[in-house]
Image (cartoon, rainbow, N blue to C red):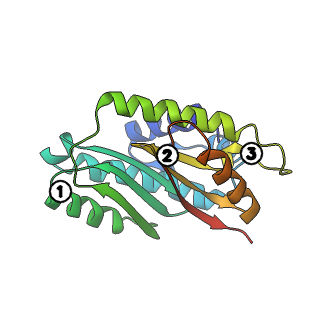
Amino acid sequence: MNPLLFTLLLSSLSISGCANHAVSDQVIDALMVNDRRSHDALVSDLDIEVSVKDVLKDGGDALWYSHIVTAVYNGKVLLVGELPDAAARTKLIDGVRVIKGVKEVHDNVSGDAPISPALQSQDQATKEGLLAALSQIRTIEGFSSSMVNVIVENGVVYLLGLVHRNEGATAVNVVRHQHGVRQVVTIFEYLD
């Protein structure tokens, strides 16, 4: 999936507030070029992403002093970052669990103070390097780096996607050798 197109889509969704009415079939088709999710699963994930953003907005003052990164893939929600307020963290996780279409919540939010903007920038640079490295995989016919969703938080890399076992193993092998990677966590769904 083209990261720029996905970002623009999410921006339009946050303005409109409802994915089902805001996303045309042409936009969904563009997002699905190398995506293995069904049309309905992709639309559901976009709806979930908007709902997660709403939960974050309604989280109160504690979330203003936090750093939370989210990803949704095939009904699985990944939450990573830092949120020092335990009650706010519980409210966040509970709020996400009840969103329609959520199958699983991967809670990797620590109770620490938010990482610095410098570390956040370093994570972004690491992610860009990882995406570039994944796009160089040529040993697996039909593989596209857009089949793997990459999230980086404080040097920990989270990989999501619908992949075959050999694709997942190759992606992990490529990622773990890149600069700035402390750990790799897979949240893949395997097709075989």
Residue located at (47% from left, 32% from top): 124
Secondary structure under the numbered disc 1 in the rendered image: helix
Q: Mark 1 highlights which residue? A: 88
The answer to the question of whether label 3 and label 1 lie on touching residues, with beta carbons closer than 8 A, is no
From this view, report whether residue 55 is shown above or below residue 117: below
How packed mark 2 is, by other alpha carbons closer than 10 Å (few <14, some 14-19, many 20 or more), is: many
Q: Which mark is residue 151?
A: 2
Between 171 and 104, the residue placed more toward the observer is 171
* Residue type, numbered disc 2: Ile
Marks 1 and 2 sit apart, C-alpha to C-alpha, by: 22 Å
Mark 3 Cα within 10 Å, few/some/many (few <14, many 20+)?
Answer: some
Badge 3 or badge 2: first in the primary sequence = 3
Q: Is residue 149 above or below residue 7?
A: below
Q: Secondary structure at mark 2?
A: strand
Q: Is residue 152 left or right of residue 85?
A: right
Q: What's the amino acid at mark 3?
A: Ser
Q: Looking at the image, which is closer to me, 42 or 136? A: 136
| Disc 3 and disc 2 in contact, CB within 8 angstroms | no
Residue 28 in percent (x, y) is at 63, 46
**Camera-side residue of 160 and 10:** 160
Q: Is residue 18 above or below residue 126?
A: below
Question: CA separation, marks 3 and 1?
Answer: 38 Å
Q: In the rendering, at what x and y percent does residue 149 appear?
A: 58, 48
Question: What separation in Å lies between label 3 and label 2 (alpha carbons)?
Answer: 17 Å
Q: Which quadrant does the N terminus fall into?
A: top right
- Residue 113's label in the rendered image is none
Q: Element under label 3?
A: loop
Q: Residue at x 37, y 64 (%)?
A: 99
Q: Which residue is mark 3?
A: 144
Residue type at numbered disc 1 = Ala
Q: Residue at x 34, y 48 (%)?
A: 53
